[in-house]
Amino acid sequence: MNKKNRIHIICFGNLWFGDDGFGIHVYRQLAKRALPQHIKLFDASLLGMGALNCFEDCEKAIVVDAIDYMGNAGKVHRQDIKDIKPAAAHYNTTHNLGINHLLQLLPIIFENKTPPTILIYAAEIAKLPENFSDQLSHPMQNAVGKTVQLIKQEIFTKTHSDTKLSNHFNQNETTSPRHRQSGYYHQ
């Protein structure tokens, strides 16, 4: 299958850091659904810069992650890559490079290729735990379901008008491994 109409959903987050695990909770909900062959789901967890390959061979990439609290915990934001603020240029280690750095590198990586259209779905965190926890705050739990629905609309309303695909997505089946890709935690 060529990259035309291929969509990658790339979910980031630290599952053991409360609300920061938002993207992985969205991944888990999406992974329970049977996805059409042109959609690939990636658990990018803490890959950061290691997730560059998740953006290859697709026409559209949907990034899911948590963002800092801006006054409305659990609010889901839909952003275009152009809406992302430039990352700070001063760093002396690659350990702290985040998603914004990754997104800034994509035009360089795709310099001689057509880059995918990139959309970001991000929810404002309510709080971060003092101890390790895989539990989301109540506002973020609500944001997971909302984000899954928004992604569904993004995929099937804006890209495809085929109601068969939409109904297929609603089935609560387990996705076959060819539709999912897991990332690895970096150390």
Image (cartoon, rainbow, N blue to C red):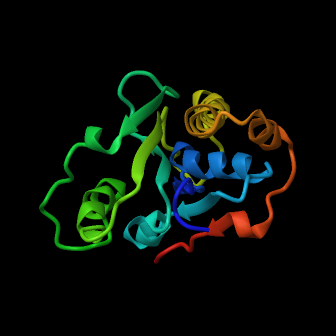
Q: Nearer the viewer, residue 95 or 184?
A: 184
Q: Residue furthest bottom?
A: 187
On the question of residue 145 being in view, the answer is: yes
Q: Nearer the viewer, residue 158 or 93?
A: 158
Q: Residue at x 59, y 32 (%)?
A: 150
Q: Nearer the viewer, residue 187 or 31?
A: 31
Side of 143 relative to 30 (left or right): left
Side of 113 relative to 90 (left or right): right
Horizontal and vertical percent position of residue 1: 62, 68
Q: Nearer the viewer, residue 91 or 179?
A: 179
Specify the quadrant of the image occupied by residue 81: top left
Q: Residue at x 79, y 48 (%)?
A: 33
Instruction: Please count the marks in the image.
Output: 0
**Would you place residue 150 above or below residue 63 in this image?**
above
On the question of residue 134 being in view, the answer is: no
**Would you place residue 122 above or below residue 4 in this image?**
above
**Would you place residue 131 above or below residue 1 in this image?**
above
Q: Residue at x 48, y 75 (%)?
A: 186
Specify the quadrant of the image occupied by residue 39: bottom right
Side of 45 relative to 70 (left or right): right
Horizontal and vertical percent position of residue 157: 61, 31
Q: Residue at x 76, y 69 (%)?
A: 177
Q: Residue furthest left?
A: 90
Horizontal and vertical percent position of residue 57: 49, 67
